[in-house]
Image (cartoon, grey):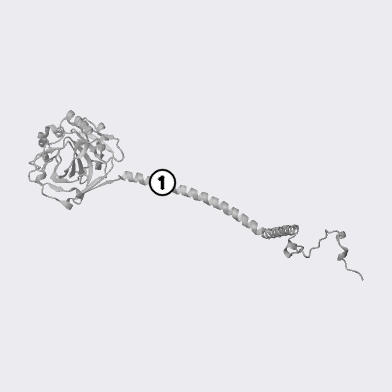
Amino acid sequence: MDIKKQWSYLNYTKWKTNFPECDPNNNPNQSPININRNDINLDCGLRCQLQIKYQSSKCYLVNQNNTITIRYEPGSFIMFQNTWYELIKAEIHLPSAHTVDNNHFDMEIDLYHCLDKTCSEGIVLAICLNAGSEYGNSANFFSQFVNQAPVENTSVEREVEVSPEWNLIDVFPEDLTFYFYDGSEAHPPCSQGWKWIVFDQPSNIGTTIYKTLKYNIIEKRGENIRPIQPLKTREITKVLGKYVKILRTTSYKKLLAKKKEEEALTQEQIETHEKMMKERNSQSLGNNIRTSMWKNWYEKNKKRIKGVFIFIVVISYFILAVQITRFIIRNDLVNRAFGVGNNPETKTNNNLPINNLSNSNLPKTF
């Protein structure tokens, strides 16, 4: 790199010498600025609707000019005023580069979105943060890489392992109301053609994380923000949070991986189903074969089976008849049924002896 093109935030007064666009006389739309809430009367509404579609990314870090910069993987976009911009990087600044009502926040992360591949112009989303709870989506986002972020200036990019769901969407505040103005890059080369969206309310960064970044960036290396630049004749437009839509999307790589996983699962289900069907068909075939064999055997032996069945029935009836006859004889059921031998008037007393007959009862002979 040309030594004349090297810069730091400590010698910002010399930027305009080596970077002409940092000179307000050449480019009056300098950034960052102070936002005075009481001086803003414009409300853009639907004309300034902001749509944010971010996907998860790997984390690539570099520290140049005492600024920790996150390179974000391709595939994340915003749409503003019917134009799409792609997210390429995020820069961390302590304290906040922008001020609201002349007050700095503890920190600011600037999300750069390019209009095209040249990245000569685009939109920067500025999200301010204050130290607070150690928990929450925003604090978790920073906690995954803060202890591995390079402290010294380096041009060598470092990949830090983060969760598969690591996504800059987690950094956005709950209240998405923002201010919109025309500006420039907030550091050399101070290129024109950059529009800024500054969110009104801060998000949260854990106190421990903030202290770590402050120590590594500010206390070790010095300032990493440019002083506030004059607004001049520029207008600041306010857009209410209800006109901001955020969508967490899935990266193309993850979509492919998910698709392959679903295809593999589907194929496994198909193979399992086919195996079950084969087993069922095999069982069914065996049953059909056995059934067919029994049917064939029955057709061949139908007359014989019928004869045997009739013989068994006849024998059963004969045995039953014999048993019934024996029962009738044994219990004298026929005489009982017709009343034979049961009338006392007709019954002969054969047990009386002849000697007991009196002569007087015999008929006299003349």
Nearer the observer, 226 or 122: 226
Q: Estimate the x, y position of residue 361 in percent, counting from the top left.
A: 86, 65
Residue positioned 64% across, 57% down in the render:
298
Amino acid type shown at disc 1: Leu
Residue positioned 65% across, 59% down in the render:
299
Furthest residue to the bottom? 366
Q: Is residue 267 visible?
A: yes
Q: Estimate the x, y position of residue 314 in percent, counting from the top left.
A: 71, 60
Furthest residue to the right? 366
Check disc 1 and report the residue beneath it. 265
Residue positioned 31% across, 45% down in the render:
252
Q: Is residue 154 visible?
A: no
Nearer the observer, 346 or 185: 346
Residue 92 vs 322, above or below: the answer is: above
State the quadrant of the C terminus: bottom right
Nearer the observer, 262 or 190: 262
Q: Estimate the x, y position of residue 240 in percent, counting from the top left.
A: 17, 48
Circle 1 residues within 10 Å: few <14, some 14–19, many ≥20:
few
Q: Secondary structure at mark 1?
A: helix
State which quadrant residue 348 falls in: bottom right
User: On the picture, is 164 further left or further right than 63?
Assistant: right
State the quadrant of the N terminus: top left
Q: Estimate the x, y position of residue 215 in percent, counting from the top left.
A: 19, 29
